């Protein structure tokens, strides 16, 4: 009875995640039942909705109620958009639906950030009150929800964006509304990608809901490859190097020479890639076993030869969502309205305020003069102004999507500025289309190091911590062969793992494809033995410290 209570109750210290045995027992039970009912589409949707809601409950507890309220509300928003006769009515429904979804997201994710920023800017002393927790406790009893702090529900950013895409895609006539409520709930709650992505677009997933289940040997083998690859990335590339090296340096960078922090940040780039792409690899593999296709979310991002190329390869589902539902509606690379200029001015003022880098005032004024002169004297230059401002807005919003802190705003703004600069540089660069190996290496090296540098603001949560680490590296680099040798000796196993990770990442795609084909063509017993051996070896790297997936916090 105690074990049954553990299975069907919520324990925040033991969420149901891909790297634990309980999840695989859960998935095995799901597949057994799924194999019996997959021909009955409505029953299949009801069943997968039920197990997905249970999965979310095991991850987030009573926040499952928030998910259920969101499901009901957004299902009807989709129907109202479809049934509305007038164009203006459709736009009003979309506006209200998007506002309510984003308001809920803002309440849970940005209440403290916006309140603190407002208090600092206007010298007020407003406090955040968790009204929803008080309401929840009145219904479910005292202590059901924490009233002292607003806790972020796991995956709220992911299912909010998916819900918004549903009624917008209906408005754009890219999809028809689902046939019934449970088809919709299945689309939003689908458990492999519910809490950490990839973000599933309505137009990509909903057409699959009523398709017959199909899984041949090649698809099965490919699925197993994705799952095993994801486990290796998470357990070895992410968790092992984080626990045994990166976390130690990040917790006390001043205790080490500055060059060690540089090594740690290189390792962190590998960690966060292994963590997030590992999750999505497993999600994609699990989905294919169930007969559903999720789109690729990562494409060897550290092979990128520019910042623009990197963002075409990294977290592709978020990038395409921001492009189609924010960047293009803003005007994309062609037009922009008064709101574009206002939003950009607000971003600059906010950046100046939170960073206290008052030199940015001169940057803003200088860019304003340059853009005005360009519009006056260069034909079609206004198009470039709109493109640049829309890019900056989109990347800052992307930074805020990742987290409610000034560090994420700075991180997004830095990447936005880099994209703007690159768009001009590529027009005059003599090396843009060069095929020289040295040039290609330099582009990859420069792009990787820029992305790693901006991740200092991604990794450190405390205000001022990124600049403190940068100052430490600058003032105490202290590189000598002797100290470098001591660091290598102390963290020898970690550096072997990091080296292995980067070598595999930078291998040509045709070599990786060759190994995948070799596995797919192998007899099933050989595949089973290979997978069992790899999993046993991988789990030797598991530490006692539990490391949740990084993107759970988003």
Image (cartoon, grey):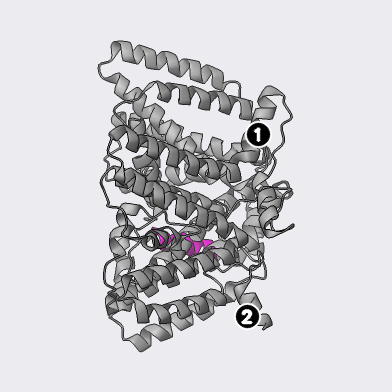
Quadrant location of the N terminus?
Answer: bottom right
Q: Nearer the viewer, residue 448 or 54?
A: 54
Which of disc 1 and disc 2 is earlier in sequence?
A: 2
Q: Which residues are magenta?
A: 497-506
- The 10 Å Cα crowd at callout 2, few under 14, some 14 to 19, many 20 or more, is few
Q: Residue furthest bottom?
A: 525
Q: Give left or right: position of 432 versus 264.
A: left
Picture mark count: 2
Q: Can residue 210 be seen?
A: yes
Residue at x-position 47% and y-position 60% = 194
Q: Nearer the viewer, residue 537 or 18?
A: 18
Q: Position of residue 519 (x, y in %)?
A: 33, 78
Q: Is residue 460 magenta?
A: no
- Element on which disc 1 rests: helix
Q: Nearer the viewer, mark 2 or mark 1?
A: 2
Q: Can residue 470 be seen?
A: no
Quarter where residue 12 is shown: bottom right
Q: Position of residue 340 (x, y in %)?
A: 41, 25
What is the distance, in whole Å, between disc 2 and disc 1 at their CAs? Answer: 43 Å
Q: Position of residue 470 (x, y in %)?
A: 63, 39
Residue 279 position (above or below residue 415): below
Q: Give left or right: position of 522 versus 410.
A: left
Q: Give left or right: position of 236 versus 514.
A: right
Residue 413 position (above or below residue 226): above
Which residue bears the numbered disc 1?
Answer: 115
- Element on which disc 2 rests: helix
Residue at x-position 37% and y-position 72% = 44
Which residue bears the numbered disc 2?
Answer: 4
Considering the whole magenta stretch, tell me its main secondary structure: helix
- The 10 Å Cα crowd at callout 1, few under 14, some 14 to 19, many 20 or more, is some
Residue 141 position (above or below residue 398): below
């Amino acid at each position: 009875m105690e074990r049954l209570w553990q299975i069907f109750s919520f324990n925040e210290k033991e969420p149901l995640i891909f790297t634990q045995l309980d999840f695989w027992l859960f998935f095995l039970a799901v597949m057994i039942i799924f194999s019996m009912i997959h021909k009955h589409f409505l029953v299949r949707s009801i069943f997968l909705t039920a197990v997905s809601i249970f999965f979310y409950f095991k991850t987030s507890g009573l926040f499952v109620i928030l998910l259920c309220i969101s499901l009901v509300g957004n299902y009807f928003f989709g129907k109202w958009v479809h049934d509305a006769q007038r164009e203006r009515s459709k736009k009003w429904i979309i506006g209200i639906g998007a506002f309510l979804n984003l308001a809920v997201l803002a309440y849970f994710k940005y209440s403290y950030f916006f309140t603190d920023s407002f208090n600092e800017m206007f010298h007020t002393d407003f406090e955040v009150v968790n009204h929803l927790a008080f309401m929840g406790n009145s219904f479910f009893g005292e202590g059901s929800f924490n009233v002292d702090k607003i806790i972020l529900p796991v995956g709220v950013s992911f299912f909010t964006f998916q819900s918004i895409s549903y009624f917008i895609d209906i408005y754009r006539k890219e999809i028809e509304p689902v046939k019934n409520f449970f088809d919709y709930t299945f689309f939003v709650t689908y458990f492999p990608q519910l809490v950490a992505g990839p973000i599933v677009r309505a137009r990509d997933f909903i057409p699959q809901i009523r398709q017959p289940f199909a899984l041949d040997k090649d698809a099965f083998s490919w699925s197993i490859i994705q799952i095993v690859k994801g486990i290796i990335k998470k357990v070895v590339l992410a968790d092992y190097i984080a626990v045994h090296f990166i976390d130690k340096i990040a917790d006390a960078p001043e205790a080490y020479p500055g060059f060690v922090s540089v090594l740690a940040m290189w390792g962190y780039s590998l960690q966060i890639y292994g963590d997030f792409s590992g999750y999505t690899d497993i999600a994609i593999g699990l989905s294919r076993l169930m007969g559903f296709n999720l789109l690729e979310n990562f494409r060897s991002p550290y092979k990128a030869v520019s910042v623009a190329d990197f963002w075409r390869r990294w977290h592709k589902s978020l990038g395409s969502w921001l492009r189609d539902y924010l960047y293009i509606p803003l005007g994309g690379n062609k037009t922009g309205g008064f709101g574009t200029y206002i939003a950009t001015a607000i971003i600059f003022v906010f950046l100046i305020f939170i960073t206290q880098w008052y030199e940015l005032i001169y940057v803003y004024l200088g860019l304003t003069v340059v853009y005005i002169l360009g519009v006056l004297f260069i034909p079609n230059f206004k198009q470039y102004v709109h493109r640049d401002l829309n890019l900056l807005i989109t990347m800052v919003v992307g930074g805020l999507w990742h987290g409610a802190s000034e560090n994420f705003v700075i991180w997004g703004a830095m990447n936005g500025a880099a994209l703007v600069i690159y768009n001009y540089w590529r027009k005059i660069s003599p090396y843009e289309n060069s095929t020289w190996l040295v040039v290609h290496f330099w582009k990859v090296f420069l792009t990787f190091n820029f992305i790693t540098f901006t991740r200092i603001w991604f990794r450190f949560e405390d205000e001022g911590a990124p600049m403190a680490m940068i100052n430490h590296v600058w003032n105490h680099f202290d590189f000598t062969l002797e100290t470098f040798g001591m660091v290598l000796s102390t963290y020898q196993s970690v550096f072997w793992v990091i080296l292995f990770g980067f070598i595999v990442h930078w291998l040509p795609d045709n070599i990786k494809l060759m190994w995948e084909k070799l596995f797919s063509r192998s007899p099933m017993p050989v595949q089973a033995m290979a997978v069992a051996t790899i999993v046993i070896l991988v789990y030797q790297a598991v530490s006692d410290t539990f490391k949740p997936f990084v993107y759970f916090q988003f």
